[in-house]
Image: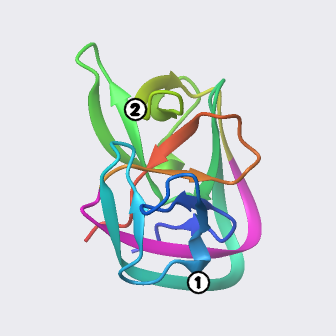
């Protein structure tokens, strides 16, 4: 199974102070990050993957951007009922609907993907597992104020 990773330069909200962004590579087991619903999520496992060629996916909506490994789980929204499916980032395409974070209301909203570009790059990656595995915001500080929601690796 491929690693389902954040990039080293991804930042997640600290659960103790949601105004603080913690770099993914500095999280430790038992660290707590903030889920989009405001709940505290415990980091149960951290695996740092050394630099190597990886397939990355750059996801972009009108309001948000995120770059992750192609096997990283992203929430896709389908159908009139807006069913939420967890999919690998590499399977997403322009025109798909994903969940992003509405920063003003601390809530998930649906947005259309404008781009899902596959790129090859030599990068470090960080595999995180969460308990519970709720959607979290990951920021690479190149994105507009709304962020695509993502999950940790499957238990």
Is residue 2 visible in the rendered image? The answer is: no
Give the main secondary structure, helix, strand or loop, of the magenta stretch.
strand
Few, some or many C-alpha atoms within 10 Å of disc 2 (few <14, some 14-19, many ≥20)? some
User: Pointer 1: what residue?
Assistant: 49
Q: CA distance from mark 1 to mark 2?
A: 31 Å
Is residue 101 visible in the rendered image? The answer is: yes
Q: Is residue 134 left or right of residue 11?
A: left
* Displayed quadrant of residue 75: top left
Q: Is residue 43 left or right of residue 122?
A: left
Q: Which colour style is shown? A: rainbow
Q: Is residue 61 left or right of residue 96?
A: right
* Helix, strand or loop for disc 2: strand
Q: Position of residue 23 (x, y in %)?
A: 62, 69
Determine contact: label 1, label 2, CB under 8 Å: no
Magenta-highlighted residues: 118-133
Q: Position of residue 20 (x, y in %)?
A: 59, 59
- Closer mark to the observer between disc 1 and disc 2: 2
Q: Which mark is residue 107?
A: 2
Give the residue at x 52% y 28%.
104
Give the residue at x 59% y 57%.
68
Furthest residue in direction front, as rendered: 17
Q: Is residue 82 magenta?
A: no
Quadrant for the N terminus in the image: bottom left
Q: Nearer the viewer, residue 31 or 97?
A: 31
Q: Is residue 120 magenta?
A: yes
Q: Position of residue 11 (x, y in %)?
A: 61, 61
Q: Is residue 62 left or right of residue 107?
A: right
Placement of 111 over or under 75, stated as above or below:
above
């Amino acid at each position: 199974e491929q690693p389902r990773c954040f990039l080293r330069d991804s930042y997640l909200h600290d659960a103790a102070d949601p105004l603080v962004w913690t770099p993914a590579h500095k999280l430790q087991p038992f660290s707590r990050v903030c889920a989009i619903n405001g709940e505290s999520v415990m980091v149960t496992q951290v695996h740092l993957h050394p630099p190597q060629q990886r397939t990355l996916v750059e996801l972009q909506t009108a309001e948000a951007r995120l770059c992750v490994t192609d096997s990283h789980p992203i929430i896709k929204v389908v159908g009139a009922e807006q069913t939420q499916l967890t999919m690998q980032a590499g399977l997403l395409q322009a025109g798909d609907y994903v969940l992003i974070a509405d920063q003003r209301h601390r809530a998930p909203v649906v947005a259309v993907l404008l781009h899902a570009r596959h790129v090859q790059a030599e990068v470090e990656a960080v595999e995180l597992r969460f308990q519970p595995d709720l959607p979290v915001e990951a920021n690479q500080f190149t994105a507009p104020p709304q962020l695509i929601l993502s999950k940790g690796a499957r238990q």
